[in-house]
């Protein structure tokens, strides 16, 4: 299962952490993983290009951190897209929300 952890402070998104694999199909055929990967890497590219945050990629984990309001807005767009996938494939994508300081 893909786990998405959303951290926010006063309704502004601070970070998204994405871990795991959907395992909805054989490797190379998993459209849920492919969709989530496209969303996440598009967000990483936007954060990097607009210099409004940073991201870290480790094996099976990607953390995207907003650096300012623009970065938070990008994370909001990513979250909306990920929520759409999670609603369609609830057995493969789970989103957890945390309020942080």
Image (cartoon, rainbow, N blue to C red):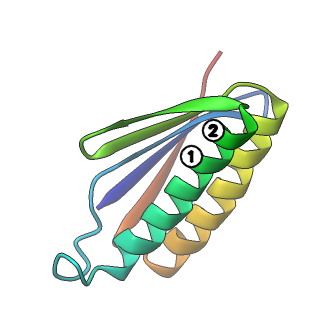
Foreground pick, 11 / 47: 47
Residue 42 occupies quadrant: bottom right
Residue 83 occupies quadrant: bottom right
x%, y% of residue 9?
71, 26
Residue at 61%, 22% (x, y): give it: 100
Q: Are marks 2 and 1 in contact (CB under 8 Å)?
A: yes
x%, y% of residue 8?
66, 32
Q: Is residue 1 visible?
A: yes
Q: Is residue 90 visible?
A: no
The residues tagged by marks 2 and 1 sit, at their Cα atoms, a distance apart of 6 Å
Residue at 37%, 81% (x, y): give it: 31
x%, y% of residue 56?
43, 32
* Residue topped by disc 2: 48
Looking at the image, residue 54 sits to the left or right of residue 4; the answer is right
Q: Residues within 10 Å of mark 2 (few under 14, many from 20)?
A: some
Task: Give the number of the disc on residue 55.
Answer: none
Give the residue furthest to the left: 26
- Secondary element under disc 2, as helix, strand or loop, is helix
Residue at 43%, 62% (x, y): give it: 37
x%, y% of residue 96?
49, 46
**Up-down relation of residue 14 to residue 50 (above or below):** above
Looking at the image, residue 72 sits to the left or right of residue 18; the answer is right
Looking at the image, residue 51 sits to the left or right of residue 65; the answer is right
* Residue topped by disc 1: 44
């Amino acid at each position: 299962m893909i786990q998405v952890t959303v951290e926010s402070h006063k309704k502004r998104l601070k970070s998204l952490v994405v871990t795991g694999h959907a395992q909805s199909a054989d490797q190379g055929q998993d459209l849920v993983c492919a969709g989530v990967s496209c969303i996440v890497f598009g967000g990483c590219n936007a954060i990097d290009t607009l210099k409004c945050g940073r991201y870290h990629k480790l094996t099976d984990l990607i953390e995207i951190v907003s650096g300012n309001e623009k970065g938070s807005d990008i994370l909001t767009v990513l979250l909306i897209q990920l929520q759409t996938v999670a609603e369609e494939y609830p057995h493969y994508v789970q989103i957890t929300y945390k309020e942080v300081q």
